[in-house]
Amino acid sequence: MSSRRSALLQFVRGSFRAWVIGSPIYYLWLAFLLALIGMGAYAYSNQLEHGLILTSMRDPVSWGYYIGNFTFLVGVAAAAVVLVIPAYIYHWKPIKELVILGELLAIAALVMCMLFVLVDVGRPDRLAHIMPVIGTLNVPSSLLAWDVLALNLYFFLNLSVVTYLLICLFRRKEANPYLFMPLVLFSIPVAVGIHTVTAFVYNGLPGRPFWNAAILAPRFLASAFCSGPAIMLILLQILRKTSKLDLKIEAIWKIAELMAYAMFLNLFFLLAEVFKEWYSDTHHLQHMRYLFFGLEGHTALVGWAWTSVVCSVVAFLLFLIPGTRKNLITLNLGCVLIWVGVYIEKGVGLVVPGFTPSTLGEIYEYDPSMTEFMVGCGIFGIGALLFTLMVRVAVDVVSGKLLADEAA
Amino acid sequence: MSCGEGKSRRTFLKVAAGTAALAATGCGSEALKSFMKTHLREMTRGELSKYLAGLEQGYEEQFGRDVEVHATPAREGVLFGYGLDLSRCNGNRMCVAACVEENNQSRFTDEKEHTNPIEWISVLEMETEHGIEFSHADAYYNPKTVPEEGKFYVPVQCQQCRNPACVKVCPTKATWQERDGIVVIDYDWCIGCRCCMSACPYGARSFNWCDPHLPSDEVNPNMHVLGNRPRQRGVVEKCTFCIQRTRAGRYPACLEACPTGARKFGNLLDPESEIRKLLEQKRVFVLKEELNTQPKFFYFYG
């Protein structure tokens, strides 16, 4: 018992050391994140005082930037599975360590998701009503209720797998595959599930034709499998430079190749939607027309929409061609482009056109307010800080810098 | 409002969790009270009357006036339905004003930093050459006199659907359909996620984006707990067919205010009612019938 306690102490002490000792760039990064968080906290306290009136949302566009970010981040969280499948199922040695990082990313993304929901609801003091067991969760009929369940499940699955793997590595023990493999296998359908259910929250609203298309969930998955790994690729390169983590460059190329396939599907699904809407030319086309060309002089989203398309297409080409995929400059450019493309597409590009024009034909031009932007930055700051702190411990454990004493 | 299953277990868990939360955070009694609140439909008779008395006391303190908050239940054998004669409606919007007054909606103000006036009825001006087409609708028409040449008017409010999309999506069961067909919201249970607003095909739900503005001398003191009692910031609200009136055998305020007689109301289960006669004698239609929401709000050309 006492050896176990001393090992725990050692782990805590080692983690603490990993958090406070770092390069000047690391300290600068922490300061930057803390500044973001402070800004977000200030904006959110304002919002708590005055209400959601400080956002640009109003009755015709009743969801906006917050829920768009939520949707995008559910995709990032789900995409951890992209790294789990090849690593665990096909015993792909070079990627195995990456799985830990991927799942940590999922955890950070899920925390951000929950925060974006928190800041979006009108009565955060009543969130207990939406909690399983203590609230009155409206299952099976409400998709948002299902989303709460799925996100919680996925969060605890990732948390337990990562914690178990890290503890095993720390204690110099071989992880018991009979213990964690079933959880890992189970987390794959759950990862697909969280993004599918999130898509269904929109999809199941027949009064909103822009979302009421069967292709929505597949599109969500395809775009998520681009944006999640894009963050991982950049992170992995940073880690290759700054830590002793032994990552083979082939693993990075492989992930990039998988992303090219996902982006192809994403673009193909978009084409299928565009064709259906434009060729049918019904009233339902209005929403897509608003997104890409504007309606009656209202063009707030047009620039964003085309930026998204161009970024996605260019990134697809960069990742498809082996020469540019294996060149670190074009690879990183592709990652950034994918991030921009999918962030717009799954953020305001998904949410706002669904509401514009409204069900009664009103065009309310939504543009995120300063409060929304600042609160959003704060949440991204919290997520990035959490991720940074978790990764620093994980890297030390995986690279053998943070190990339990032999005696322990 | 009958007792639901699983109540005692949930109450126990809430007491346990609430105590733990209080101990851990030392948060205020208000937050705890709201956390510990029972869902309206799960309250016993005793709990309900205590709750209503608490509401009355709160409003009396807030507005400095005597108010009555009722919880009159649905009557057996009643299913409310509404009829609207499009050939009579001339777009005068008296119904909108009467609705705001009756139902304690948030008023416009320029004295406060923020304002969020709420109207439960939108009268849409449409073009005669297009017929009923929402993409050519204008809810903000403002001519000197109505009706305008080449225009006609379609008032839209909660359609009290038999198959309400809004109720289905609510994650917390804060909105439901009563036995007399009225879709209601528990303003003390709604978390303000606005799923119902995304789901409603008729734009019939409004959100309190800031503290509602309701001057004391404009308060309607005759309130129903599921209807016109003043709302708080951060919750959704909607038309309830004036539940505080119609359950007491009166007409909705919008109907009484309409100077053209375009509005009809009654019990769909009573063969002698005005609304049933209307359904038999006129050919009626509902909005967006393809969505299968099955409104109990019928439009016709008289």
Image: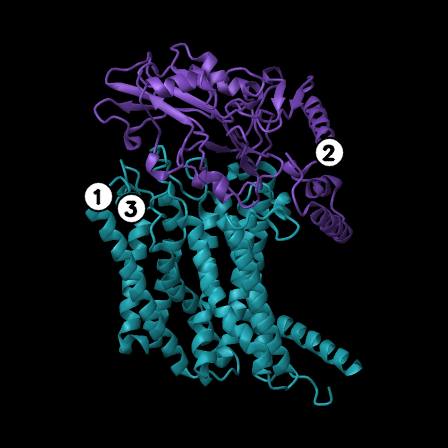
Chain colours: A cyan, B purple
Where's residue B254, x and y in %? 46, 17
Hey, which residue is sitting farthest front in the picture? B271
Toward which corner of the image does residue A124 lie, by quadrant?
top right
How many numbered discs, if any?
3
Side (left or right) of A172 relative to B151: right
Question: In the rendered image, is residue A23 in sight?
Answer: no
Any mark on residue A281, and which? 1
The earlier-in-sequence mark between 1 and 3 is: 1
What kind of residue is marked 3? Met
C-alpha gap between disc 1 and disc 3: 11 Å
C-alpha gap between disc 1 and disc 2: 56 Å
Residue denoted by label 3: A288
Mark 1 touches mark 2? (CB < 8 Å): no
Side (left or right) of A312 relative to A148: left
Side (left or right) of B13 relative to B135: right
C-alpha gap between disc 3 and disc 2: 51 Å
Residue denoted by label 2: B47
Q: Residue at x 38, y 25 (%)?
A: B298
Q: Residue at x 28, y 61 (%)?
A: A267
Q: Does dot 1 land on a helix, a strand or a loop?
A: loop
Side (left or right) of A18 relative to A371: right
Where's residue A406, x and y in %? 70, 90
What kind of residue is marked 2? Glu
Q: Quadrant of the C terminus of chain A?
A: bottom right
Subunit ID for the residue under disc 2 = B
When the figure is inspected, residue A85 is found, relative to residue B167, above or below; the finding is: below
In front: B299, or A108? B299
In front: A8, or B105? B105
Q: Quadrant of the N terminus of chain A?
A: bottom right
Q: Does dot 3 land on a helix, a strand or a loop?
A: helix
When the figure is inspected, residue B7 is found, relative to residue B205, above or below; the finding is: below
